Image (cartoon, rainbow, N blue to C red):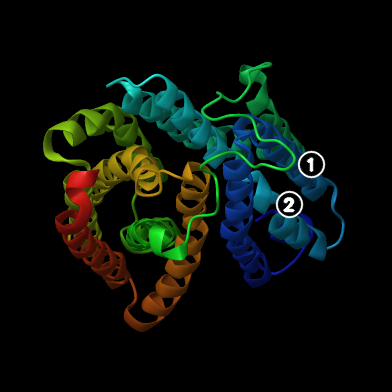
Amino acid sequence: MFVACVLESSLSTAGLFYLTNLTAPVAGYLVGARSDRTGRRLGLFRLCAVAGFLGWVGIALSTQLWIPFAISALVLGFAGAATSQLFAAIHDEATLRPNRGNDGVVAIVRMALTAGWVVGPVAGSFLAAEVNLRTMLVVTGLCTLAQVVPLGALRTPATHPAPSADKPASGHRRPPVRAMLPLLTFTGLYVLVYAGEPIKYAYLPIYMNDQLRLDPALSGAIIGVQPLVELVLMPVAVIAARRIGTIRLMTAAAGLGVAANICFTTTGDAAGLLLGQALMGGVWATFMTLGIIVAQRLLPTAVASASAIFLSSSALSSALGGLAGGLGVAAAGLPLVFLIPATLALAAAVGLVVMDRAIGSKL
């Protein structure tokens, strides 16, 4: 909404800003492929963080409408690859020191990211209200840069011999497309589940405010319950995956997504919406914690590429969800539009069942 509020563009033009995220998968793959060739995860992580800082500051200082679009498409796409490099470095460390608790480390990092999504919007809203939007964006850039501080002078674990000028790192040739098919299939199923999020966050507040006439404080509590449930259930997801299997647990989580969206569609009261949001917390506690682990296991010879492909797919999900939601709400209205994410989650659950029968035992 910066484009609309600061540069005085229309809301429809501002909405197109999110389409710039479609470059993120390409940027993420390029960074991941480079990381897999060199093994320099943390160096690329630092470069991506610097790119994020420069990008957000550039947007904050922009005076022309095209500048935020260009920066978001060309710079912030690469900045978003920082997270995939972090998880690739964690994988390398886990490979060096195999331990049953390594999946728990991933869960802790994921919990930290989720906590950031809780704190960030609150802090951003406060800065925008008390100071201005440009200051908020500069602070966003500083927070992005601050990612490198906890690393200090830490280097990437040496999981393979250092590459030389005439001999790349062993085992880091670009994987063939055939080897990537399981990862791409799994990522596609994840996209179907995630596509419901932009639909929910676009239309659930409108539904609560315009049709159900809920008190704003109650509406905010309903929206806020999902990340809280996520934080509580993320460690539980790791333990449950060890007992029943990772893909099977994710299949059940996709089923929770179906149930959650049916609650949004049929209940018509605060209790039903609250239940739906709690169920969605279970969905994302599972997918956010275990998804990156599964992606890396599906392409073990190129974990940075796997991480980048999986994590950057959220941009495709947002585009798919935005398009489907816009067409659905125009055709069916509220709350029937929530049947679209319910259907997408059901399709993902069916796909995960098939995947579990094919390769589940290998994960």
Instruction: Return the mark for residue 75.
Output: 2
Instruction: Return the mark for residue 122.
Output: none
Whether residue 222 can be seen here = no
Q: Is residue 125 above or below residue 155?
A: below
**Residue found at x 61% / y 44%:** 37
Instruction: Return the mark for residue 54.
Output: 1
Residue 8 horizontal/vertical position (percent): 77, 63
Q: Is residue 270 above or below residue 101?
A: below
Badge 1: residue crowd in 10 Å (few <14, some 14–19, many ≥20)? many
Query: Viewed as shown, does residue 191 lie left or right of 309?
Result: left
Closer to the camera in the image, 71 or 32: 32
Badge 2: residue crowd in 10 Å (few <14, some 14–19, many ≥20)? many
Farthest residue toward the front?
166
Residue 41 horizontal/vertical position (percent): 60, 34
**Residue found at x 24% / y 49%:** 270
Identity, as a three-letter code, of the amino acid under mark 2:
Val
**Residue found at x 36% / y 83%:** 331
Label 2 secondary element: helix
